[in-house]
Amino acid sequence: MIVKFHKAMDISKECVDVFSWRRVYAMDLEDAVAYAHRQIAKQRAFKALSALKEEEVLKDKIVLDAGCGPGLKSCVLGPYGPKVVIGIDGSQPSIAAAQALSDALHLSNTRFIKGYIEDIPQLLLQAGISKVDFVICSQMIHHTTDWRGNLKIFWEILNKGGILGVSWLDVSSNWGKYMIKNKIAFHLGNSKESRSRIGALLFGRWDRPKKKLPIAWEAFYADRYAAFYKLITVRQMVNTLQRIGFEILESYPCIDWKEWRRQELQRAPSQQHGRILKLLEYPIFRRPFTSIMRMRQFMGLGGDVRVIYCKKIAHQGK
């Protein structure tokens, strides 16, 4: 009966309930302002090896932060000169925290709206916006009931050539340890309170060093153990994005030999990597290289979170 309930539940609403309960990722305002200033001081919205340029992707653009939480990304993007950054989240405490952070940073180009990702088209229309230029969905897609359907929504609201940045907990990275612990705690418990307690009791000793942000321990445990995470593999994500009509631009960690080569050419390759680059000129080595690289990622090289940036092109399927 428990399994049937888990399959039938509205994951989006369940997760919003968890995030509202413990204000997941919401810091004290002073800490949030300090964090935002540190991120802004880096003068880089994208990865160091990214080919994406802030002037092209953000300046004078309409940006959507889908699942914005307490605004830690929305408010960092604001100073790069977008026309407006719209943050949408189902948790009212998160929306309040995001607005407070924006006010503290004196940002005039951010706007926060309470609502579900599934309702984004209607929410944007109510705000007088039909299309956007850049969508960021940071570690939220795995907390939604229909993640494929939500990716299609992002495609529909993007202008042609618009960019989507999506990140999620990759079950095929780092032995899947994060996901395994989440599933154990989730299925042993029957409420958000019990799941947080069970997870903290079973795994807290090993997971506590991973708390990098100054958030409450209760929020840290709620995110890891009480919130439901969808199992999404790299192959599923890439195939879905391409089928909808996105072109993959870059990924972190690399998803294949092409992306590895792109990143290596952005920096001065070591002598060993220079040899590998020469081998990759021959098609026979490309698939084995990708397989070995992905296996190394599964064995713990690269972390738990996968990030993909892609561009809207033609509609290629349902």
Image (cartoon, rainbow, N blue to C red):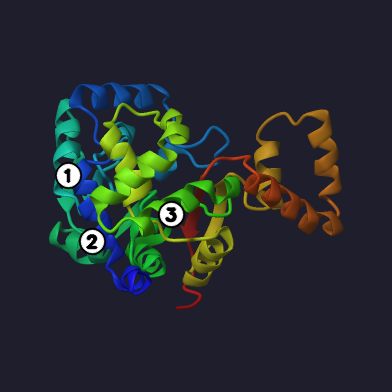
Report the residue marked by disc 2: 13
Query: Please, what secondary structure does the residue beneath circle 1 have?
Result: helix
Report the residue marked by disc 1: 95
Q: Is residue 75 visible?
A: no
Q: Nearer the viewer, residue 10 or 89?
A: 10
Q: Is residue 106 visible?
A: yes
Q: Amino acid at mark 2?
A: Lys
Nearer-N-terminus badge (1/3): 1
Spot occupied by residue 98 in the image (x, y as percentages of width and height): 20, 38
Query: Please, what secondary structure does the residue beneath circle 2 have?
Result: helix
How far separated are the C-alphas under marks 1 and 2?
A: 16 Å
Q: Is residue 6 left or right of residue 13?
A: right
Spot occupied by residue 317 in the image (x, y as percentages of width and height): 49, 78
Query: Residue 184, labelled with which disc?
Result: 3
Q: Depth-wise, is mark 1 or mark 3 nearer the camera?
A: 3
Q: Residue at x 29, y 31 (%)?
A: 79
Instruction: Kindly check if marks 2 and 3 are in contact, taking CB atoms under 8 A apart as contact.
Output: no
